[in-house]
Image: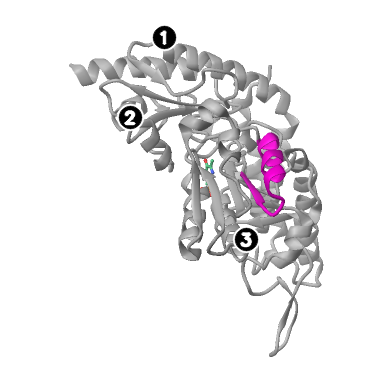
Amino acid sequence: MKNFKEDFPLLEKHPSLSYLDSSATTQKPRIVIDTLKDFYENRNANVHRGVYALSEKATEMLESARKKTASMLNAGEDEIIFVKSATEGFNQLSNALGENVMEDHNVVVTEIEHHSNFVPWQQLAEKKKAGFRVAKYKDIMSKGVDAIAELVDENTRVVSFTYMSNVTGKILDVKKLAELVRKKNKDVFVVVDACQAAAHKKIDVKELGADFVCLSAHKVYGPTGTGIVYGRKELLKKIRPFFYGGNMIHKVSVEKTEWADLPGKFEAGTIDAAGIISSATALEYFHRHHEEITRKEEKLKKELVAKLRGVERVTVIGHEDNEYGPIVSFLVEGIHPHDLATIADRDNVCIRAGHHCAQPLMESLGVSATSRASIACYTTEEDITKLVESIKKSRQIITR
Ligand SMILES: Cc1ncc(COP(=O)(O)O)c(C=O)c1O
């Protein structure tokens, strides 16, 4: 079995660190750091601009990264738009798709969304005086994606939902939901948040059947600062650009501006070539080891859930069946998640505590915060054992 930790310089340098916060951001493999460094040391020039060899080579590398990214997501090259994060993607999509949302329309999301896929749609609905329909966590748990589809009617214009919850790891059946939505209304834009899913599952945008899919490279072993928006070509051709400026134009005159062809139309200004090229390296790393990663993460997730359930007065949220990714939120009776995270940190165990940018879900769960442990390819059994020991220790410290 591969020793993934060896590929990650930070984890190699800190062998006693148990990093269980990969859902916030994954650690970066050496190959990604080297790609980033190589670009700045040997290849740096602005892309799509210069006619000299250095710039042409940088452009070639960027477009090759796009080609690889598109192929890994099963999208067309002109359907991949690079932005700075998934958050930017959702905001820009809500602006662009929002042009089709009018007063008697409605937008559908869920209570389990990260704020980045909740607030932009809420604000759009408010601005347009449209309906804002939110599928309840409890209904999703009992009825699955039907609970979301049943909110769709002939006035729905957007349905935006997560593939995998960043709080509980719950996986939604995206394909089924996209089909149910389209059966009810063909004019709906189906938007998917694949931020967490992309770190654990291969994303095939065609198979999912969504119109738009957003993700952040830093959650899939890539650098911070690069987000990916997949959009169906015929829709990208129709909607307005996200930003205006250089690169995204075909022709500008005093009277009017014509947009560049896809995907340039959506990539105004100087884009983060170094970040995009190393993000493609990161996605390749994940794809190369995908089968082994999935097997390992699945085994560790089961072990984590079982061990947590074995500790007195610890409640795991969800994970009753296998429709969950390796992200586990839990509550320890009598101990605030922040206290637990601080105590765990003293044992070099990094876990997340808080509302995880998902306050509507917290409200539905009736808590203000949870503790969250998330698994990546480099996680080991020892990391999980250390976490469980820290939880036991925290009880002795707090109740002493
Ligand atoms: C499910 C989900 N969606 C969206 C985001 C936003 O990602 P970013 O902060 O990289 O824009 C996150 C980040 O935690 C997330 O977990």
Q: Is residue 220 visible?
A: yes
Tell me which amino acid carries mark 3.
Leu
Which numbered tag is attached to residue 97? 3
Residue nearer the viewer, 241 or 397: 241
User: Residue most toward the bottom?
Assistant: 254
Alpha-carbon distance for marks 2 and 3? Answer: 38 Å
Q: How many C-alpha atoms fall within 10 Å of the one at disc 3: few (<14), some, or many (≥20)?
A: some
Label 1 or label 3, whichever comes before in sequence order? 3
Residue nearer the viewer, 351 or 5: 351
Alpha-carbon distance for marks 1 and 2? Answer: 18 Å
Label 2 or label 3, whichever comes before in sequence order? 3
What secondary structure is found at the residue carrying circle 2? helix
Question: Which segment did they paint magenta?
Answer: 174-192
Q: Quadrant of residue 271?
A: bottom right
Residue denoted by label 2: 337
Alpha-carbon distance for marks 1 and 3? Answer: 47 Å
- The image quadrant where one finds the C terminus is top left
Residue denoted by label 1: 310
Residue nearer the viewer, 58 or 215: 215
| Residue 358 falls within the magenta-colored stretch | no
* Image point (61%, 37%), residue name: 163
- The image quadrant where one finds the N terminus is top right
Label 1 or label 2, whichever comes before in sequence order? 1
Of tags 1 and 3, the one toward the viewer is 3
- Colour pattern: one colour
Where residue 311 sits in the image (x, y, percent)?
37, 11
Q: Is residue 21 left or right of residue 154?
A: left
Where residue 10 sits in the image (x, y, percent)?
53, 35
Q: Quadrant of residue 74?
A: top right
What secondary structure is found at the residue carrying circle 3? helix
